[in-house]
Image (spheres, rainbow, N blue to C red):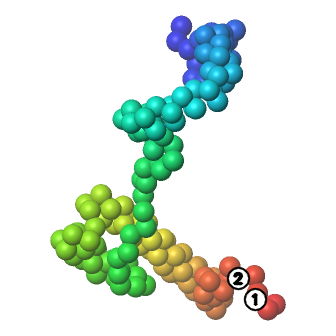
Amino acid sequence: MPFQKGESGNPAGRPRGALNRATVLAQNLLSERAESIAAKVIELAVQGDRAAIRVCMERLVPVIKDQPIAVELPPIKKPADSVEAAAAIAAAVAAGELTAAEAAKLAKVVEVYVRALDSRGFDERLGKLEHEISGAPAIPAHAANSDDTNL
């Protein structure tokens, strides 16, 4: 009989997140000596031990994973404007201002923004059609969703 989705094969087993005894023991032993271990690593680093220096530097100056990138993109007011934005991204890669990975991330941001514009445009067109069909005057979508409309 196969297991049901979301049910454990061993309901009486170890609960999630529970650590085994060896891990708990190791953590306790290490925590009791953490200060002396850190002092020894620093001492070795001062004496020129390269591995100790690396450990200390990794803690003092962590690797920077992402940094802001400065690229001029044209304003995107409608989905068709994304072509110019993509061209600007490609030009920045060609000029060496962006890496291919940075360009891919930036293109993804543009893509998400364009989808949001498309969605808003669709919502506005649908609202207009619904109001025309019902015979009521069309209300712009941004006005219909606004909190500051006067009744």
Q: CA distance from mark 2 to mark 1?
A: 6 Å
What secondary structure is found at the residue carrying circle 1?
loop
Q: Quadrant of residue 47?
A: top left
Instruction: Tell me the tag on residue 149.
Output: 1
- Disc 2 target residue: 146
Q: Residue 148, image x and y in percent?
A: 76, 87
Residue 19 visible in the picture:
no
Residue 98 sits above or below residue 28 on the image: below
Q: Residues within 10 Å of mark 2 (few under 14, many from 20)?
A: few
Amino acid, disc 2: Ser
What secondary structure is found at the residue carrying circle 2?
loop
Q: Quadrant of residue 79?
A: bottom left
User: Where's the N terminus, which quadrant?
Assistant: top right
Q: Residue 72, image x and y in percent?
A: 35, 81
- Nearest the camera: 32 or 106? 32
Position of 11 compared to 5: left or right?
Answer: right
| Marks 2 & 1, CB-CB < 8 Å contact | yes
What residue is at 43 percent from the left and 54 percent from the top?
Answer: 64
Q: Quadrant of residue 137?
A: bottom right
User: Where's the C terminus, which quadrant?
Assistant: bottom right
Position of 140 compared to 100: left or right?
Answer: right
Residue 75 sits above or below residue 119 on the image: below
Position of 76 compared to 151: left or right?
Answer: left
What residue is at 51 percent from the left and 47 percent from the top?
Answer: 60
Instruction: Tell me the tag on residue 106.
Output: none
Residue ranking furthest to the front: 47
What residue is at 61 percent from the left and 10 percent from the top?
Answer: 22
